[in-house]
Amino acid sequence: MMAAGSGGESTVERCEKVSQERPDSAAAQFNLGLAYTRKGRAERAEKAYRKAVELDPDLVEAWVNLGGVLLLRWDFQGCLDANRQAIERQEDLLLAHYNMGQACLYLGDGEGVVRSNQRVIELDPNHAAGHYFLAVGLLATQHEPEARLELARAMEADTGDHPVQAD
């Protein structure tokens, strides 16, 4: 089965072609990064996102996605740095704060886990994973009663999975 698109080209092939035709386009590089990310090609995605932020340092989506790809590549400090760049430009980016919390977790920075996930919950009070990882951070920083409370909140958080009610 051929991929959708003109001439049977895959999304990656189309994005590569556009990025070659428009090498100074941050959007083209960003889209190429997305295509590589979706295919699990993290190293190539990282290069495309880095090129996108080089061309347009205010493209916050590229900073966030660069941070996410660096997290996947186990470059936790790089993840923190990229997401900080995104947050400097737009403070209310839930995914950037969440990514930073994950990087802090892997770096053994319990206070960073707490700080990042508190912000996640400020942005989305029903973010189940935010509550869970806040509990993890609180436990790591010796705040067991608060950790238990956050774990309970994680289990109660609205996941959007609501049963259909009969008429």
Image (tube, grey):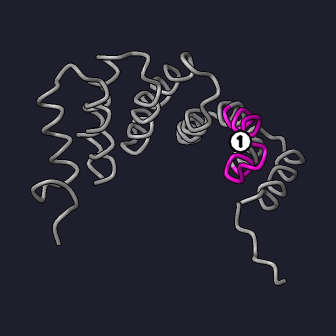
Q: What residue sits 77% from the left and 55% below the top? A: 154
Report the magenta stretch's main SS. Answer: helix
Q: Residue furthest bottom?
A: 166
Image quadrant holding the N terminus, namely bottom left
Kindly identify which residue carries mark 1: 137
Magenta highlight on residue 32: no
Q: Is residue 136 left or right of residue 63?
A: right
Q: Is residue 30 left or right of residue 88?
A: left
Viewer-proximal residue, 24 or 114? 24
Which span of residues is magenta-colored? 116-132
Question: Secondary structure beneath disc 1?
Answer: helix
Relative to 78, residue 37 above or below:
below
Task: Where is residue 22? Give x, y as percent.
Answer: 17, 25
**What's the amino acid at mark 1?**
Gly
Q: What residue sits 54% from the left and 17% below the top? A: 89
Magenta highlight on residue 129: yes
Task: Where is residue 158? Give x, y as percent.
Answer: 77, 58
Task: Where is residue 25? Give x, y as percent.
Answer: 25, 23
Q: Quadrant of residue 111?
A: top right
Q: What residue sits 30% from the left and 38% below the top? A: 31
Image quadrant holding the C terminus, namely bottom right
Task: Where is residue 41? Give x, y as percent.
Answer: 26, 48
Q: Quadrant of residue 5?
A: bottom left
Relative to 9, residue 85 above or below:
above
The local crowd at label 1, few if under 14, some if 14 to 19, many if 20 or more residues have their Cα within 10 Å, is: many
